[in-house]
Image: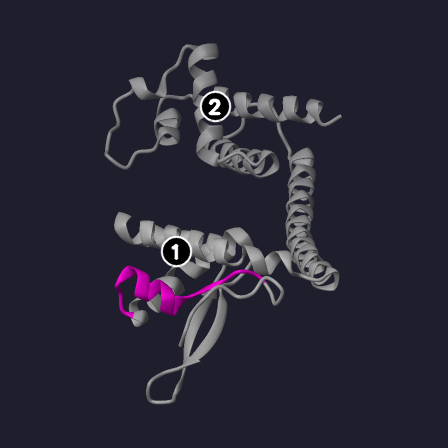
Amino acid sequence: METNLINFGESRQTMSSLEIAKLTGKDHAHIMRDIRNMEPAWEKISQSKFGLASYTDAQGKSRPCYELIKRECLYVATKFNDEARARLVIRWEELEKANIGTSKSMTAVQMFALQAQINLENENRLNVLEKKVENMEAEREENGRLLLEAQVSTNVVPTMTLRKNIIALVNEYSAATNTPQKDVRHSVYKDLYYKYDKSINSYTKLFSRESKLDVAERKGLLQPIFDIISDMILRWRESQK
């Protein structure tokens, strides 16, 4: 099968996996495998799949192949060595120059159709992104509502209840502010050091799996920790007004 760039007037410029295999000196089956393995990450970022096509082999059987646009080819080329990547870049440049004359001969209707297709693809991608943003915003608002309703107190409570309240407030603050829990805990222990002159890291662990909260409980520091996370939530509430 002769592989070349598709005419501008028909669609977008593409290169087949067969030609990629020929340029890189690799088996076509290996190129197909590499492309399949790299497609999930590409689809996640670009919101589009690689183009599938077919060709007739020497036995007259129909076989699958890929038709990739330039940026997809360059992405796949990150799997290749320097020499193979250089061949691919040079080949694209040759084929693009060869198609300059063809692109100039496009009719107004063809140009309009091509632009309409590009606009449609961009609009579809934008719609997907907007939907994701809407879902994230709705989730953030719901988490914020839960944090506004969370029960906080500066009163001393039994140790186990105090510990559970600390864990719950850290989780709710993390969800409402989109802050990783480890970063919330780091802020709490940082305030514990600067405001209460107590460093969790200065205490020796009794056993390897003893957590910082375990150490704080053992050293009677749960109340100031509870006060700190409560203060963080109260200040966040004020910022939402």
Give 188 or 10, whichever is nearer the viewer: 10
Residue that label 1 marks: 91
Q: Which mark is residue 42?
A: none
Residue depicted at x 33% and y 89%: 59
The residue lying toward the viewer, choosing from 47 and 59, is: 59
Residue 107: x and y in percent read: 71, 62
Q: CA distance from mark 1 to mark 2?
A: 57 Å
Residue bounds of the magenta highlight: 12-27
Q: Identify the residue at image location x=66%, y=49%.
A: 135
Q: Nearer the viewer, residue 199 or 108?
A: 108
Mark 2 closeness class: few <14, some 14–19, many ≥20 residues within 10 Å: some
Q: Residue at x 26, y 65 (%)?
A: 26
Q: Measured along the vertical axis of the image, is residue 110 above or below residue 142?
A: below
Find out whether residue 22 is within the magenta segment: yes
Question: Does the magenta segment cover residue 21?
Answer: yes
Q: How is the image coloured?
A: one colour
The answer to which image quadrant residue 100 occupies is: bottom right
24 to 180, vertically: above or below:
below
Residue drawn at (39%, 65%) of the image:
36
The foreground one among 126 and 234 is: 126
Give residue 175's position: percent from left, percent from top: 57, 39
The image quadrant that residue 153 belongs to is top right
Kind of residue at badge 2: Val
Query: Height in image: 100 above or below 179?
Result: below
* Residue matched to label 2: 188
Kind of residue indicated by mark 1 = Arg
| Among the two numbered marks 1 and 2 on one chain, the one whose residue lies closer to the N terminus | 1
Q: Secondary structure at mark 2?
A: helix
Please report contact status of discs 1 and 2: CB closer than 8 Å, yes or no.
no
